[in-house]
Image (cartoon, rainbow, N blue to C red):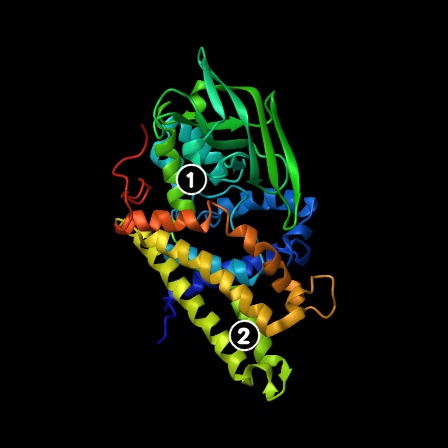
Amino acid sequence: MDFSLPYTEEQEKFRRDVRLWLEENIPDSMRQPTDARDFTDEQYWWWREKNKEIAAKGWLYPTYPKEYGGGGLTGDHETIIEEEFLRARVPRGGFTPAHVFPTLLVWATEEQKQRFLVPLLTAEKVAWQKWTEPQSGADLANYQSHAVRDGDDWVLSGQNVFISGKGNAPDWLYGPMVTDPDAPRHRNLGYFMIPNPTPGLEIREQNLLVGNDQHFIFLDNVRVPGDHLIGGDHQGWQVASTSLESEHGGRGKAFPTDDEMGNLISYVTDTPGAHGTLGKDPVVQQTTMDAHLEAHVDSLLSKRTFWMYQNRMELSYEGNLANTHNREYTVRTSERVRMAMGMYALLGTQDQMAPHGGAQEVAQRSRAGQNHAGGSTNIAKVVLARRIGISRTKERAAPTPSTATSFGS
């Protein structure tokens, strides 16, 4: 069955325009390295400026509203942009996790959208998601970092770990803080945009196996203006849930890819084996086909969610199903790569014998930790169970720009 998406002549012309612009404007030295650890400070600041240019063309965040700095384009345009940026090894999107954009669209006042959303969508500013805490991980119901009202301001204190972000100088951190320790959970949080630099705020790099794009955050009596609170001072859980809806797959993907699977097929097709090529071995062949089929299933699940989101259809379990499947099948694919490639799967980018420039070693090294991002796989299964009605408790999807009837408070 052919699952390829047919494009119109107008869309193919748009593709040619995107491809030509990338060829003429992106030097080879600024393209995405195989290992994220090789992404230099020079590349970071070059892309900080180039992203402003891409945003002005409407390609950085194509489907977000034009009046706030997005492209105002269709999902088909976003798919084409995703395809061409990937082909050209161009970093996709800015350096702000996109989960904050739906949150600001749904919950922020118009003044807050102009203050925060516009400079983020136009790449003038960068924000990081400040959630995970040392004692409870991603369990927002057990949050400890707190905010105390002081006149018109809030004073914030607390700690976070594993906060993702390139560079070391975001303009804002965003996330929940306990505003009322006596209130019941889900009604005791506020959601803040925290400016950086600010007295009392410290950001430190974590030197991890996958690189230095993770950080410690320390807040010691950090003073934040009252108009940096998004939503009400007891609505932080609800506001954060809109971010989580996106992080847990609720927006889908325009062009989901699996480079690890593609490299596996290439490797077993081209590598000599006992029966001609490695892929002639029936066990290797079956293992590779399993990876290929699961990758297509994953792609269809993500594309379905993206299609539903862009068409403002009500979503319940679809995004969580895609998210849970992706977490589990990518681990299985990593195991299949090790089985087929053997020790070659562990040769890094600096080894001349590494297949595909060492891309599979990067994937092997990052896979286990990455599957804990945005909450563990077990949490993803709990959310899915609640959505399909087989848990002790049930829940509905949080409001998003796709489903909310109005924006702002």
* Res 315 visible: no
- Which residue is at the front of the view, 142 or 75? 142
Count neighbours of disc 1 (C-alpha within 10 A) and say few if under 14, some if 14 to 19, many if 20 or more. Answer: many
Looking at the image, residue 272 sits to the left or right of residue 302; the answer is: right
First of labels 1, 2 by sequence position: 1
Identify the residue position indicated by label 2 in the image: 265
Figure check: 360 above or below 205: below
> How packed is label 2: few (under 14 Cα within 10 Å), some, or many (20 or more)?
some
Q: In the displayed structure, would residue 103 be above or below residue 333?
A: above
Residue on which disc 1 sits: 101
Quarter residue 240 falls in? top left
Mark 1 element type: helix
Determine the residue positioned at 31% across, 52% down: 317
Q: Amino acid at mark 2?
A: Ile
The kind of residue on which mark 1 rests is: Phe
Residue that appears at 37% across and 22% down: 233
Q: CA distance from mark 1 to mark 2?
A: 36 Å
Where residue 100 appears, as percent x and y from the top left, is: 44, 38
Q: Position of residue 401 (x, y in %)?
A: 33, 42
Q: Residue at x 51, y 66 (%)?
A: 333
In front of the other: label 1 or label 2?
2
Quarter of the figure with the N terminus: bottom left
Q: Where does the C terminus fall, quadrant-wise?
A: top left
Q: Could one spot residue 283 in this view of the protein?
A: yes
Tell me, yes or no, whether the two marked residues, 1 and 2, touch with CB atoms within 8 Å: no
Using the image as rendered, state which of residue 1 and residue 77 is in the foreground: 1
Pinpoint residue 21: horizontal percent, then vertical percent.
Answer: 55, 57
Q: Residue furthest bottom?
A: 275
Q: Position of residue 73 (x, y in %)?
A: 38, 51
